[in-house]
Image (cartoon, grey):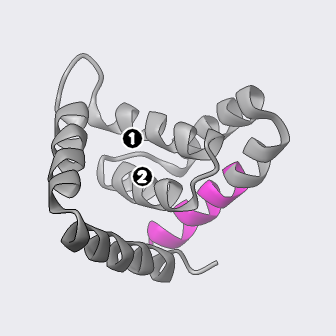
């Protein structure tokens, strides 16, 4: 999978949807901003949680977006791999498959 192309396509689809339902787009963006702002948990760890949830919910685009954001927040490959391991433990076989994709995304998106 080409993660850069995948995320570009997802962004195009999201932009099209935001034009069709701008209020929903604004609302979701507000929720994302509020949820990811500094608090008791730092941004890097919030992004790692997002990766784990993306794996558990089998959302390829979520995995890609949050791996990219985790890299920007300073997450290492080892931290993402550890996050994948916990996701596999909690989610079983499907998490194993999507977890492998998250590590592939890290390798491609980190550079």
Mark 1: give few (<14), some (14-19) or many (20+) Cα within 10 Å. Answer: many
Residue 35: image quadrant is: top left
Compared across the picture, whether 59 is left or right of 90 comes to: left
Compared across the picture, whether 10 is left or right of 42 comes to: right
Above or below, comparing residue 33 to residue 89 in the picture: below
Q: CB under 8 Å between callouts 1 and 2? A: yes
Helix, strand or loop at label 2? It is helix
Compared across the picture, whether 24 is left or right of 97 comes to: left
Q: Which residues make up the magenta segment?
A: 99-111
Magenta stretch, overall SS: helix
Instruction: Residue at 15% x, 53% y: name it.
Output: 26
Above or below, comparing residue 24 to residue 7 in the picture: above
Helix, strand or loop at label 1? It is helix
Instruction: Residue at 30% x, 47% y: name it.
Output: 73
Residue 14 % position (x, y): 33, 69
- Residue, disc 1: 47
Residue 92 % position (x, y): 81, 35
Quarter of the image with the C terminus is bottom left
């Amino acid at each position: 999978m080409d993660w850069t192309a995948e995320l570009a396509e997802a962004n195009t689809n999201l932009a099209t949807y935001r034009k069709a339902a701008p209020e929903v787009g604004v609302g979701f963006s507000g929720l994302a901003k509020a949820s990811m702002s500094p608090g008791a948990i730092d941004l890097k760890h919030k992004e790692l949680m997002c990766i784990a949830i993306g794996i558990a919910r089998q959302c390829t685009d979520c995995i890609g977006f949050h791996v990219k954001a985790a890299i920007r927040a300073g997450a290492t490959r080892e931290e993402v791999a550890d996050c994948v391991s916990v996701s596999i433990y909690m989610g079983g076989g499907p998490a194993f498959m999507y977890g492998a994709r998250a590590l592939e995304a890290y390798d491609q998106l980190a550079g």
